[in-house]
Amino acid sequence: MSRAYGWNARMLIGFEATYGVIPNLEDFFQVPFTSNDLDSSQGLIESNVLGLGRDPTEPFQDVINVDGDIVVPVDLRNIGFWLKAVFGDPTTTGAGPYAHEFKSGATSLPSLSTEKGMPEIPDYPMFTGVRANSIAFNFARSGEAQTTISLIGQSETPQNSTFVNNPDQLDYTKFSQFQGSIKQGGTVLANVTSASLTYSNNLEKIETIRDDGKIDGVDPGVASLSGNIAVRYADNALMDAARSGTPIDLEFAYKIDGDRSLVLTCHRVFLPKPKRSVSGPGGIEASYDYQGSKDPALGNMITAILTNDVENY
């Protein structure tokens, strides 16, 4: 009897032309991932019928929910698919390298179909009507750069064979935390020990009455930008901005060289005033749980620019 192993699992994604409709074969790509818990669930509702004795009558099925988080490496090319899912279609300039500019605040977002393949079983469930709810980055001193993406979908189609036998793949070139940087006002922010960034579309499920238990769709709500910056307390630059309520800009970047990079710019960030706790003889840290807002001049809250050799997404 074969058993499924993560090392042999695979993930396919393809953007849908019509919500909930599986794309054509040539529109699918096989993408790298670290973990994938996107799946469907359907609970049971306990019967409350009386008058038929102490033993209950059979339960009945509840609605279907399709959701879950995936963790993917922040790589040079495939991350563009997920940025498109989160922010919408980019504006692409250049003739190689190409600069793909993604902006927050799009009024409509693309949907995708994704297959989770476990060939040993074989089991290849296809999830359709999937939209990206949020994307979260964590910056640290070392390690592999990864991001967590929260997904919400409409339905699952069971399959015992893959939908695409030989899907296209983009070359995998990883970013590492060593290649990360954080800037404020165009200058590297000193004394940062860790940082995080989370952008959310705050998707709303359209839960209409249907005879198949599915949702009608997933619509974007009011977006949000939040995160944390932990710094060794060495000056009052961030503390002064927190005290005065003055917004600042923050740039989070991974750069291999001038032609290969991912730059996330939060245009207007507000810092709370944190506590400065002295708990021992070591260095004193201050932690800022920031929130972002739309820049009135630019018209958006965050801009992501991915520079690589991919012509379009």
Image (cartoon, helix red, strand yellow):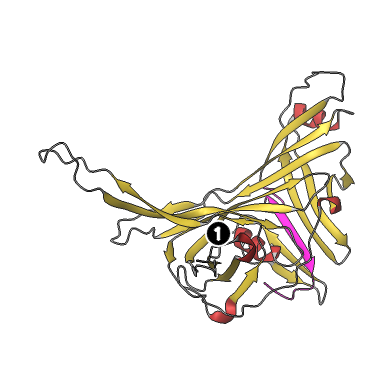
Residue at 84 percent of width and 38 percent of height: 192
Residue at 84 percent of width and 24 percent of height: 284
Residue at 45 percent of width and 68 percent of height: 20
> On screen, 149 above or below 197?
below
Q: Can you give x and y, in whole percent of width and height, for residue 224 in the image?
A: 61, 45
How many labels, in total? 1
| Horizontal arrangement in the rendering, residue 203 relative to residue 140 (left or right) | left
> On screen, 173 above or below 193?
below
Q: Residues within 10 Å of mark 1 (few under 14, many from 20)?
A: few
Task: Write down the quadrant of residue 77 in the picture.
Answer: bottom right
Task: Depth check: give the residue in front, 17 or 74.
Answer: 74
Q: Can you give x and y, in whole percent of width and height, for residue 154 in the image?
A: 44, 61
Task: Depth check: give the residue in front, 148 or 121.
Answer: 121
| Horizontal arrangement in the rendering, residue 291 relative to residue 139 (left or right) | left
* Residue bounds of the magenta highlight: 294-313
Tell me the quarter of the image containing the C terminus. Answer: bottom right
What SS does tag 1 mark? loop
Residue type at numbered disc 1: Thr
Residue carrying label 1: 107
| Horizontal arrangement in the rendering, residue 35 relative to residue 267 (left or right) | left
Q: Can you give x and y, in whole percent of width and height, for residue 59 in the image?
A: 25, 48
